[in-house]
Image (spheres, helix red, strand yellow):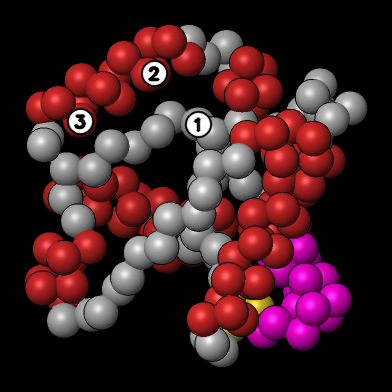
Amino acid sequence: FIAAYNEKTGHAVQFLAAPYEPDTYFKAVQGLEDESEGGARCRVCFIQRMKATAEKMQELGYDYFTTTLTVSPHKNSQVINEVGRDIEDQYGYAYLPTDFKKNNGFLTSTKMTEAYHLYRQPYCGCIFGARDQGLDLEKIRHDAEAFLAEHK
């Protein structure tokens, strides 16, 4: 996707994958498993993810950090931006406030997903949020594997 996107747009987007560390997340949200979507558990997740991003960006010498979390219609951009500003204040890493939902941002993201044949996960990745939404994670895994097999 990134290569095709950069070629089509002339941008130089890069991707850096963070290590998958579910135990760190589960420890951070311990006791918040029954919080509702958008509540304290989400805030802890935002803090954890954005701190890691800010630290990596500082390590790599970037001027600021932000997050794509604000594209979701299920995520409160004001809370996300508040967390980003708190991290900026605590650590001195410059945060770029965003609300990617604005100007049809969510619709644009879904169109890009279709245009570039990207798998779009139907939840944020939180097992507790998926549970509360009544999602069948086994079906989601199966659908993701089928999509990947079809769109090698």
Query: Looking at the image, do the residues carrying marks 1 and 2 touch, with CB atoms under 8 Å apart?
Result: yes
According to the picture, the residue beneath numbered tag 3 turns out to be 148
- Residue type at mark 1: give it: Tyr
Give the spatial CA distance, label 1 vs label 2: 10 Å
Q: Is residue 98 above or below residue 48?
A: below
> Earlier along the polypeptide chain: callout 3 or callout 2?
2
- Residue type at mark 3: give it: Leu
Magenta extent: 81-94
Which mark is drawn over residue 80? none
Query: Looking at the image, do the residues carrying marks 3 and 2 touch, with CB atoms under 8 Å apart?
Result: no
Badge 1 element:
loop
Which mark is drawn over residue 140? 2
At 84% from the left and 30% from the top, the residue drawn is 30
Label 1, residues with CA under 10 Å away: few <14, some 14-19, many ≥20 = some
> Earlier along the polypeptide chain: callout 3 or callout 1?
1
Badge 2 element:
helix
At 58% from the left and 79% from the top, the residue drawn is 59
Magenta span contains residue 79 = no
Q: Which mark is in front, 3 or 2?
A: 3
The quarter of the rendered structure image containing the C terminus is: top left
Q: Which mark is in front, 3 or 1?
A: 3
Label 3, residues with CA under 10 Å away: few <14, some 14-19, many ≥20 = few
